[in-house]
Image: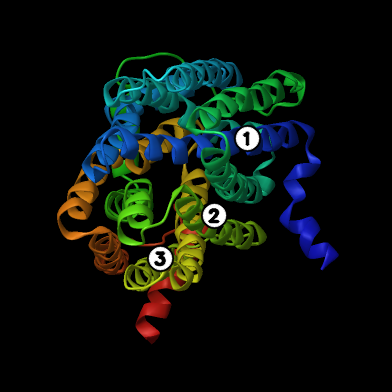
Amino acid sequence: MRESLKATFRSLRIRNYRLYFYGQLVSLSGTWMQTVAQAWLVLKLSHNSAVAVGVVTALQQLPTLLFGAWAGALADRMDKRAALVGTQTAMAIFAAVLAIITFSGTATIVNVGVLSFLTGCGNALDIPARQALVSELVDREDLVNAVALNSAAFNASRVTGPAMGGLLIVVAGIGWCFALNAVSFVAVIGGLLAMRTEELGASNRVARAKGQVREGLRYILATPTLVSNLVLVLLVSMVGLNFPVILPVMAKVVLHGDAGTYSAMTVAMGLGALVGALFVAQRTHPTAQLMAWGSVAFGASMCASAIAPTVVSMMPLLFVVGIFSIVALSTSNTLLQLESRPGMRGRVMAVRAVIVVGSTPIGAPIAGIVCQHFGARWGLGGGGAATLVITAWYIGYLRRHVEADETEPATAAAGVASLLSADGAA
């Protein structure tokens, strides 16, 4: 047991990564507090409009959709640590302004939407720089573990952040969630500034040149394992990751609960996602097979959650949704980092960010419309059913198009071969 724990958390022995990990854990908890509070504030301002929640959520992700690919090229050229200090500082300021307008009673859907968009602008550069920085903090043999621990930190924050957010909304008010989120950025900024730059790995910074975005896209399109991975993530994200829109409506309108109900539902998913992230952290060889079957289980558990009659029966199912969502997405993330050339990694991860985050401006309003006109259960169950169909396509695509030859990384080859073998045996 002790050796297993040491293997799971082995990247934390590295000082720079440890500073990064704990700073992210604190800051992301604040971010999740703000996510819960913002959805609840928009519901309050719009008199329970699911469409309004979907639109404001989409505004925060729109900059990544519009500018994410260029942000990835910029991240490949920049000092990633310095870039993160800038983006985190900007997002702290936006959170503070959101707190001020909420406390003063001047918050409207318009100014909340504007601040949501500005936060998204910071996030567009933050995501590829943050993910690419990990490869400079640890050696290649620890990269799988470090990426999985990042997912664990993200999902631990999905437990602590919503729990604290729901409690604060009930006890103190929505504005305190935004204020504490602004303060939480101090942890990650402080950790970045405290790193020992001489211990950072090679940055693989790319000289500025014309056509770098196109070059990155051509590289992805020429690599079947990358393009199939990204298409799966694109489609699943669009139809299956609209929980910030669906869950508050489910909690308040369908289950007749309050902010505490919404918080509890988010915590249940976060606990499951934490378990999924720790499971992936123990693995040394991520495979396409694991990503595919994680997606299947994710879609099936969403469908089951949609028909759960009560909050009590829904909680364990949301826990399962959390497990398999992160098994699929964390494995996707790790495979992309391992399979990408170092000089392309920032651009590849930026495209992934465009896909995961940027699909929300499309998926969130659609989910809001479905919830508004047909109910939140249809929004959740429909997303799960679509995920199952999309994953079936992915397995078929690998079967037809991906050949694991000597030019592919060993992890991708092993993953594709094992998937095709398992599919054939079935």
Type of amino acid under label 1: Gln
What residue appears at the point 32 percent right and 70 percent down from the top-left corner?
A: 303
**Disc 1 or 2, which lies upstream in sequence?**
1
Q: Which residue is mark 3?
A: 298
Instruction: Identify the element where label 3 is drawn.
Output: helix
Cβ atoms under marks 3 and 1 closer than 8 Å: no
Badge 3: few (under 14), some or many (20 or more) residues near its Cα, within 10 Å? many
Viewed as shown, does residue 3 lie left or right of 60?
right
Badge 2: few (under 14), some or many (20 or more) residues near its Cα, within 10 Å? many
What separation in Å lies between label 2 and label 3 (alpha carbons)?
17 Å
Q: Which residue is mark 1?
A: 24
**Quadrant of the rendering where the N terminus is positioned:** bottom right
What's the coloring here? rainbow
Comparing labels 1 and 2, the label whose residue is closer to the camera: 2
**Disc 3 or 1, which lies upstream in sequence?**
1
**Quadrant of the rendering where the C terminus is positioned:** bottom left
- Residue 412: x and y in percent read 47, 58
Comparing labels 2 and 3, the label whose residue is closer to the camera: 2
Instruction: Identify the element where label 1 is drawn.
Output: helix
**Residue 115 falls in which quadrant of the image?**
top left
Q: Does residue 241 show up?
A: no
Residue at the far bottom in the pictured view: 426
**Disc 2 or 3, which lies upstream in sequence?**
2
